[in-house]
Amino acid sequence: MYVTLSDTFAAGNCIDAAATAGEIAGDHQTGRRTKLGQTLFNEGDDAMYLYEVVTGVVRLSRVTVSGRRQVIAFGFPGDVLGFPSRGFYHADCDVIEAGEVALHSTRILDACTDNPRLHRYMVNAALAEISGMQDHFLMLGRKSAGEKTAAFLDVLASRIGTVTEEGTRIVLPMCRSDIADFLGLSNETVSRTFSQLRANGIIELPIAQEVVVPDRKALQDLSERD
């Protein structure tokens, strides 16, 4: 998941919205339960599988030579991760909320395949990742801390939010440092921005890992402001 302008390019919207990659693959896939903190793959590993998130949440990240971490994306149910670069994974992938993933051989990306529908799904999912990444770069370079955080929370509200009488409830599977490393901000800035959003009535914070959005429109207006 990237902070995109909309969820139009979500992997699940690439083709037949009624189907997931797992449903298209049928028996030609392998399921695996995941544990909190588990590493699914590391940067530089041979890319043998594509990982479709069925339940739970995963985190893609890279570490610079100087030891600084950049969180590249979060994977939520319906997302496909692990697209190879020259046959290798280009990031580390860790589980931050236990669940299940479906493994699909990267051979499905080859033009000659016995499941052209799944091949088309995965190609479109890869194109969706590129589109999301481009929008994310735009956000990192052109939005303020408040706009970045609002955009991030709005996407989370769409992906994992639960509508309640008080508003849209989001249980954050990631910590503040994950959010900071994803948005290109410091931990202090993220905490300060959350506090400012609460003070302005944009969000409520019942507990540290829970956000309630009383008015999605107000959050969206802030996230889209230039």
Image (cartoon, rainbow, N blue to C red):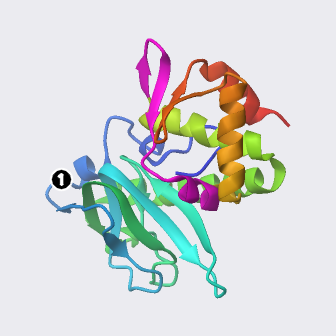
Considering depth in this image, is 147 or 189 the residue closer to the camera?
A: 189
Q: Which residues are magenta?
A: 162-182
User: Seen in the image, is 35 located left or right of residue 93?
Assistant: left
Q: Residue visible at 54% across and 58% down?
A: 178
> Is residue 159 highlighted in magenta?
no
User: Seen in the image, is 192 located left or right of residue 28?
Assistant: right
Considering depth in this image, is 125 or 80 the residue closer to the camera?
A: 80
Residue 10 visible at all: yes
Q: Residue visible at 42% across and 43% down?
A: 12
Give the position of the C terminus as an image quadrant.
Answer: top right
Kindly identify which residue carries mark 1.
26
**Where is residue 58, by image quadrant?**
bottom left
Looking at the picture, how far across and down is residue 32, in whole percent?
19, 62
Looking at the picture, how far across and down is residue 14, in whole percent?
47, 45
**Residue furthest left as drawn:** 27
Looking at the picture, how far across and down is residue 160, in whole percent?
42, 36
User: Seen in the image, is 112 located left or right of residue 73?
Assistant: left
> Is residue 168 highlighted in magenta?
yes
**Residue furthest right as drawn:** 226
Q: Residue visible at 24% across and 61% down?
A: 34
User: Seen in the image, is 77 located left or right of residue 66?
Assistant: left
Q: Is residue 107 above or below residue 138?
A: below
Circle 1 — which element?
Answer: loop
Q: Residue visible at 50% across and 75% down?
A: 91
Amino acid type, residue under disc 1 in the picture: Gly
